[in-house]
Image: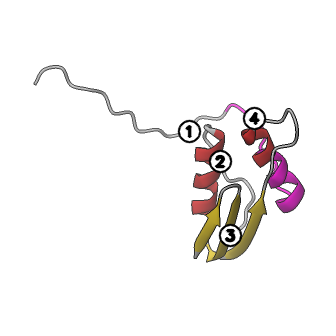
Amino acid sequence: MWSGGDKEIKIQNQELNGFFGDIESRVGLPVINETGLKGRYDVELQWRPQPGESEKDAYKRALSEQLGLELIPSRQPIKMLIVDKNNSI
């Protein structure tokens, strides 16, 4: 089960792939799961920007402080599907 509102997420008995996809959409960058975690989990996350902090930075801070997850920038090859408009129609 997934639920949540503005600035909070609650996940019950779910695999983490969907959660990592949600992280990708919130930070606007590809996220590669290197936690090694398998199975189903319950996750609760709440974030509120502090003065002068962006929504994305508040979210990243909450990931670290509440779940112990750190987003580390790196350069790795990733598989992507690119859809290009065919002009020959």
Which label is found at residue 32?
2
Q: Amino acid at mark 4?
A: Pro
Question: Viewed as shown, does residue 21 lie left or right of 50?
Answer: left
Which comes before the other along the chain, label 1 or label 2? 2
x, y percent for residue 58: 80, 44
Q: Amino acid at mark 3?
A: Lys
Q: Which residue is mark 3?
A: 10
Q: Quadrant of residue 9?
A: bottom right
Q: Which residue is mark 1?
A: 78
x, y percent for residue 47: 79, 54
From this view, report whether residue 80 is shown above or below residue 64. Answer: above
Is mark 3 in CB contact (under 8 Å) with mark 4? no
Which comes before the other along the chain, label 4 or label 1? 4
x, y percent for residue 29: 62, 37
Q: CA distance from mark 3 to mark 4?
A: 26 Å
Q: Which stretch did the figure color magenta?
A: 60-75
From this view, report whether residue 80 is shown above or below residue 5. Answer: above
Q: Which residue is mark 4?
A: 73
Element type where label 3 sits in the image:
strand
Element type where label 4 sits in the image:
loop
Is mark 1 in CB contact (under 8 Å) with mark 2? yes
Q: CA distance from mark 2 to mark 4?
A: 10 Å
Q: CA distance from mark 3 to mark 1?
A: 29 Å
Q: Amino acid at mark 1?
A: Ile
Q: Amino acid at mark 2?
A: Ile
